[in-house]
Amino acid sequence: MPFTALGLNSHITKAIRESGYTEPTPIQSKAIPIAIDGRDIIGIAQTGTGKTAAFVLPILQRLAEHPASRRMSRALIVAPTRELVIQIEEATRKYSRHLRNVRTVVVVGGVGEQPQIAGLRAGAEIIIATPGRLIDLMQQRHVNLSTIEVAVLDEADRMLDMGFLPAIRQIVRALPKERQTLLFSASLSPEIEKLTSEFLQHPQVVQIGRRANPAETVEQTIYEVPKSRKVALLLHLLRDRALDSVLVFSRTKHGADKIARKLEQSGISVATLHSNRSQAQRLSALRAFKSGAVRVLVATDIAARGIDVEGISHVINFDFPPQPEDYVHRIGRTGRAHAIGDAISFATPDDAANVRALERFITRGIPRKRMGDFDYTEQREPVAFIPRESRSFSPPRGQKAPEGRRSGTFTSRGRSHASPAPGRATAPPRGRRRREAR
Ligand code: AMP
C-alpha cells in the first residue's frame, strides 16, 4: 500500500518520500487512517516498527487540514525519556518540513527552562515532553493544556515502569475532556489496560504481531563466557571491523563506565549513555555515535530506551538482561525497519536461568557460538590494557577530543580517572589509538 492511500496531505507525503520511505510499515498502515478519523487508539508496537510516524503524521494532517484561527498548542506528546522526546521532535520536524505554521517545543529536564517556557508561551502547536519537566512547568503555570486536541502517550508501559503514573494522571486531568488520545505501548499488560480505560474513549486496538518474537531480521547468538572474560571477549569481537556501529548494554551505570574505560584504553572510540550523565553529555554521546565519530555506545536500558540510531550494526548484551522484555527492546535497536542486524549476548553460568526464561518467552532457542581463537579460561583478575605511564589519556596533539571526552564521558588530559593496577597491562599500539581517535 502506498503512503498516498492513507489520506495524507500532499505536503506530508512529499516529506515522507524525501525521508526515503516507500511504503508504510504495518503499524502505520493500520493506525494512520483510524487516527485521521479522530478515534482513540491503543497501539501495541515497539520502537523500530515506525510507530513514531504512526502518531506524528495524523497530528500533522490535522494541523494542515484544520488550521486554527490563532497560535496555540494543539497536540501533546508525552514520552518517558529525554532522548526519545528529542527523537520524536526530530521526526516531527522532518515530516512537517513542507508545512507552514507547525512549531514544536521540547519540554525536558536537564536543560534550561527558559527556551521551553518561551516556546510554550508562543503557542507552539506541538508540545513534546517528558512527564517530570512538564509537570514542573505546569505547576509554574507556564503550560496551558486546555487547547490540546490530540494527546499521545508514547511507551506508556515504560512510563509506568518508571513511576510516572501520578504525573501522567495529573497531565491528563489538565487536558480537555473532548480530545483524541493515542496510547502506545510495547505490550498490553493489565496495568496498561487500566490506564486505557481511564484515559481513552472507545479506543481501537491496533496491534502488530506482538514482537515477543524479536524481529526476524535480527540474527541472534549467545556466547557463553565466564564473567571475568567478558571484557576480553568484547575486545576480541571488536577486532572484527564489521562491527562498525555497536550498541553495548550494561546492567548498571557503573558497569557502563567501566566497559567504556576498558574499550577506550584499547583505542576503541566509545561514548556512554546513562542517567548519571548530564543532558548535554547524553546528547553529545548520542550525536557522536549517530555521526559515526564513535564506534561503540555503551548504554543502560533506561537511557537507551527508544533511542533510534540508523545503521546500528550490532547490539551486544554485555550483561544478559534479566527480563525477557528488555532483551526484546534491546535487540530491537538493530535490524530496525528492514535492515539486517546482529544481536550478541554474553551469558555467564549465573545467567543460565534467565537464558532459559528468554528462550521460552520468544519460543525459540538462540544459537550458541564460540570463538575458536579465544581463551575462555576463567581469570582471577580482569584483563587490563594500559601501562601505568599511559594512564592519562589524551587525544593526539592538535586534535580535539570528541564531545563526550570534553564533557567528562571520557578521560582527558590532566583529568584523573580510575586506572588499572600497575604491572598487568599492555598498551595498544600508538598508531592504532591515533587512528581510532579520529
Ligand atoms: P520508530 O519505531 O518510530 O522509532 O521508527 C524506527 C525507524 O524506522 C526510524 O529510523 C524511522 O525513520 C524508520 N521508519 C519509519 N517509518 C518508515 C517507513 N515507512 N519505511 C521505512 N523506514 C521507516
Image (tube, rainbow, N blue to C red):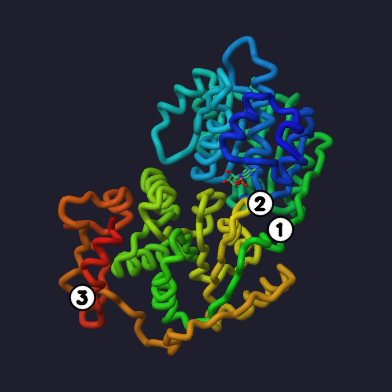
Q: Mark 1 and ligand 1: say if the CB distance to the nearest ligand atom is below 8 Å.
A: no
Q: Quadrant of residue 331?
A: bottom right
**Depth check, front residue: 56 or 121:** 56
Report the residue marked by disc 3.
387
Q: Is residue 399 above or below residue 116?
A: below
Report the residue marked by disc 2.
46
Report the residue marked by disc 1.
211
**Depth check, front residue: 382 or 132:** 382
Ligand 1 image-quadrant field: top right
Q: Residue at x 61, y 35 (%)?
A: 17
Q: Residue at x 71, y 41 (%)?
A: 28
Residue 131 location (% of width, % of height): 56, 39
First reached walking from the N terminus: tag 2 or tag 1: 2
Give amino acid for label 3: Pro
Q: Is residue 111 above or below residue 143?
A: below
Going by the picture, which residue comes out furthest to the right?
202
First reached walking from the N terminus: tag 3 or tag 1: 1
- Mark 3–mark 2 distance (CA, rounded to whole Å): 45 Å
First reached walking from the N terminus: tag 3 or tag 2: 2
Residue 419 location (% of width, % of height): 25, 70
